[in-house]
Image (cartoon, rainbow, N blue to C red):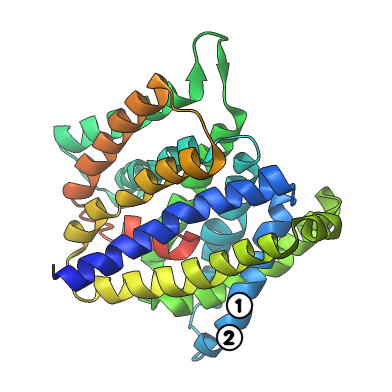
Amino acid sequence: MSFRDFVLLFAVCLVWGLNIVFTRWVVADVGVPPIFFAATRFAGVAALLVMFLRPKPEDLKMLFLIAMFIGAVHFSLLFIGLQSAEASAASITGQLGAPFSTLMSMAFLGEKIGWRRGLGIMLSFAGVVLIAFDPSSFSISIGLIYIVVAAFVGSVGGILMKRLPPIKALRLQAWVGLFSFAPLFITSGLLETGQLESVMRGGWQFGLAWLFAVVGVSIFGHGGFYSLIKKYDISLLTPLTLMTPIWGVVFGIILLNEPISARLVLGSVISLSGVLVIAVRQNKTLPDAAIIKKLGSGGS
């Protein structure tokens, strides 16, 4: 990989890592209802990428179903989880999409794994359990449970992508945004309150966080990453994207003053080691699983 392309990948992972921290600030500190924030984000993506909606995909019904999994439902659960889960822990937990994709490839696509990937799956989950479970109080983080479910839902969307003809990243983003924002606004209206008041309370800082999520993540992040996919093998890129959760932990500590604990450090090392093993030993029946999730769900 050239130095210029590595710098681009570094910047993309930096943007993705910052995104989880900014989202945590929006839904936890500012108090913007999480489903409403997801709706506004997808509305912005759909508006900015409207030119990528053409030509119309052949299987709109399947694309709508995929959009619900990697878009509306995934982000709703993720943002709800971030109301109570720390960004640093959420950054690591979100990486469970890789082992989930491998497990579902085994169940539904006939993927066979060796002992190394099996060990990687166990390490991935063991690290997250260590982070989420507090033995001193025998309690588990409810927020991280939402994020685990979000990772599972996003991986289901990745499996469904197997049934869809190849689609470019920004075109996928445009359709996911178009299909997702209306159901999310309706759901927010039924389940949440104080949407406009929270946005006003956030002021220009909320506006910048929203703009960063739409333009920085969906346009620059996914556009830049897609350009790298066309030049380099996925087996090279996927392990390098583990910079993303590392940045999430670093910025969570620096910007949100989140505490550093032995459980967080040890759990992160164990979980990311497992994800790295899975990433290096490529999924044969669904080689784009990890990439699909990043392009579809915002790299979160």
Q: Position of residue 180 (x, y in %)?
A: 64, 66
CA distance separating discs 2 and 1:
6 Å
The residue under the point 66% across, 51% down is: 26
Name the residue tied to disc 1: 46
Name the residue tied to disc 2: 50
Residue 230 position (above or below residue 88): below
The residue under the point 55% across, 33% down is: 145
Residue 222 position (above or below residue 86): below
Q: Amino acid at mark 1?
A: Ala
State whether residue 151 appears in this view. yes
Q: Amino acid at mark 2?
A: Val
Q: Position of residue 143 (x, y in %)?
A: 60, 34
The residue under the point 28% across, 41% down is: 275
Residue 103 position (above or below residue 270): below
The residue under the point 56% across, 61% down is: 71
Circles 2 and 1: CB atoms closer than 8 Å: yes
Please state which of residues 94 and 262 is positioned toward the viewer in this rendering. 262
